[in-house]
Image: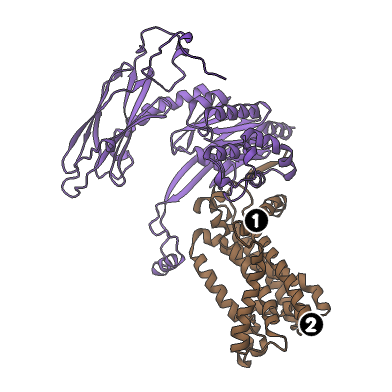
Amino acid sequence: MRTTVINPPGRLPLPPWSELWEAREVALRFGQRDVVLRYRQTAIGVAWVLIQPLAAAGIFSLVFGSVANLPTGGIPYFLFSFISMLAWTLFSSVLGRAAPSLVANQALVAKVFFPRMLVPISTAMSALLDFAVGLALGIVLLVIYGVNPGWGVLLLPVWVLLFVLLALGIGLAASAWMVRYRDVGYILPWALQFALFATPVAYSLDAVPDNLLPVFAANPLSWLMELFRYSLLGEALPPTWQIVGAVLVSIGGFLLGAIVFQRHERSFADLI
Amino acid sequence: MRQKTREIMSNAMAISVSNLSKVYRIGHQHRSNRATEAIVQRLRHPFQRAEYEYFEALDEIDFEIPRGEAVGIIGRNGAGKSTLLKLLTRITAPTTGRIELNGRIGSLLEVGTGFHPELTGRENIFLNGTLLGMRKRGIKQRFDEIVDFAGVERFLDTPVKRYSSGMYVRLAFAVAAHLDTEMLAIDEVLSVGDAEFQRKSLAKMRDAARSGRTVLYVSHQMQTITSLCTSALFLDAGRLDYHGSVDGALMRYRATFEEFASAQRQAARRPGSGELRATDVRMERAYHAADDKVIEIDLGSTGADSTLPYYVSAHINDANGAVIAQCDSRVHGVWLDPTEPQRATLTISGLWLRPGRYSVDVFVCRAGILDAWQGAQAFEVLPELPYPDAVPEDAYSNGIVLTDFTYRVDAADDFERPQR
């Protein structure tokens, strides 16, 4: 029989990894619930998963490709923006769903015990499912446009993982802060909007004037974005320091977010 | 050697709690839900230490509960019962102290937590079961049992938002009741559902206790506590006042009513805004069951500064603290003038009380509560029944109140029997 000891929270609690692993079924159920609920009581159901990235890429190609004529490094604009938006949507939807998740599940947090971290983490599942469907569509587009990404495509899962880790790191911290300060919910969409334009999503780095390049080079999201396009569109591989940096920032960001979350975890039920 | 015995000792205990306290910060004026406000506050008063008012929900509690015991937790509202359960189930963290749990603890603190209205009954069973700590296999094994217990077979694939509230509650309780944790914490759930379901769930909980599981049960219904529990904890204002037999705890509980009543006589110690308070409440000491009960309530005044009328509400409680009747002046459109002292005379007729001791709470309210005087008066109902015949106690003791009723009996032949 297992003995559990409950003590007042310490100063810098680390996430209880083994407990999280044991309760993984809870995360699975949450994820399943999110996916089921997303398309229940919709008329066209799962088709939304396909329509959303297509519509976004369509608007982008109209505005940025045709009107503003932003360069893409020789890749057809529609394909370029579709693939970029795929990665961006993954990042922003993991973050955008994780952040309000605790507040949205108030009743649970105040009434049942389970490792709270599973709530924001589980939101990644529905985002990843959307991503997978979008990716399948993206591969079809690659074939239609005749673009061969080369062997770099094998590294794609790594970049996806890094995107998710970074988004979850920020999302964990944001969800914990949101329990105390609901402002986070207002700032976040706005910050995401800003990041979307500050990151080369709708354009390639070629469009950035030389004097601004260092600013863009300092943005970890643009490293990840370049890596993602390297794998799917066969663009040039970014410099090594950016690759190492992307790995470190993502993993570091996730750990930091987890620690911030854990620091606040035990007061959630009292504050929410 | 000594170490060893201690280990065995502590293992016989399902729960050991030592020095447990929970302090809440309340009523902090600058506390805001907005980051901007918090930052502005910090900028304006950079060196000011935040000022908080503290509320000790639980104060240095120690107890041990042996395995297989069904423990009732009783106490007045706000005594810390629910906080204690929340600490034991790890929903919230203690401020000081230590809890040792030998085995897993399942909880049922509110019916239907974790139920999602859009999901079907089947989906919710799995979601809820997992949340409460069951594994998928465990749920599958007991699935039929759960559905059967709740009686919702026909609606398994209907979203629970279309369930009647009774079905909803039954399903939620069924899932929790089939948990296979070594301990089970339950907070006042038996007050829901129809009588048949209450009987079923009570039996289920008794089985749980008999099969060696430890059950913690918070309730206001003393009947349930006495019939279900083998021992009891009595909490009073965050302190553990008594731990022992159920009867002993109930006795302490009743005794503190008197202490409480005398403390409440001082108006300043009562809750409520205090703009206007009841100054005196008078009534007879004893009544016969069917007598009219007359209560005189003297009320103060606010002077001329506030002219909004207010109303008065009196609660009649039985010895266990359950509210038997609420007599609210609003139902008769009676609103009182606050500018002058008033005397309100409440006459309660048609309430037949069982012999025993009762207390009266008086509330004075406007938009908020001006005065809450719990235990303002107490009275006895004499053990003479208002019925013509003398009967053994079991002929009237099952109801909460007595009532004026008659039986008419006719020979059954006089009626036409219903045709099949």
Residue extending furthest toward the bottom = A210
Evaluate whether residue B217 shows in this view.
yes
**Position of residue B292 measured from the top left corner of the image (x, y, whole percent):** 27, 21
Q: Residue at x 29, y 18 (%)?
A: B291
Q: Quadrant of the C terminus of chain B?
A: top right
In the depicted structure, whether residue B118 falls above or below residue A253: above
The image quadrant that residue A130 belongs to is bottom right
Q: Chain of mark 2?
A: A
Give chain B's shade.
Answer: purple
Mark linked to residue A36: 1
Instruction: Answer above or below: position of B301 versus A179.
Output: above
- The residue positioned 55% from the left and 47% from the top of the image is B161
Q: Secondary structure at mark 2?
A: loop
Quadrant in the picture for residue B66: top right
Amino acid carrying mark 1 in the image: Val
Task: State the residue in front, A247 or A204.
Answer: A204
Question: Pointer 1 indicates a residue of which chain?
Answer: A
**Is residue A9 depicted above or below A235 in this figure?**
above
| In the foreground, B153 or B268 | B153
Label 2 CA crowd tier, 10 Å (few <14, some 14–19, many 20+): few
Quadrant (top left, top right, bottom left, bottom right) of the N terminus of chain B: top right
Tell me whether marks 1 and 2 sit on the same chain.
yes
Amino acid at the residue labelled 2: Gly
The residue that disc 2 covers is A146
Q: Colour of chain A?
A: brown
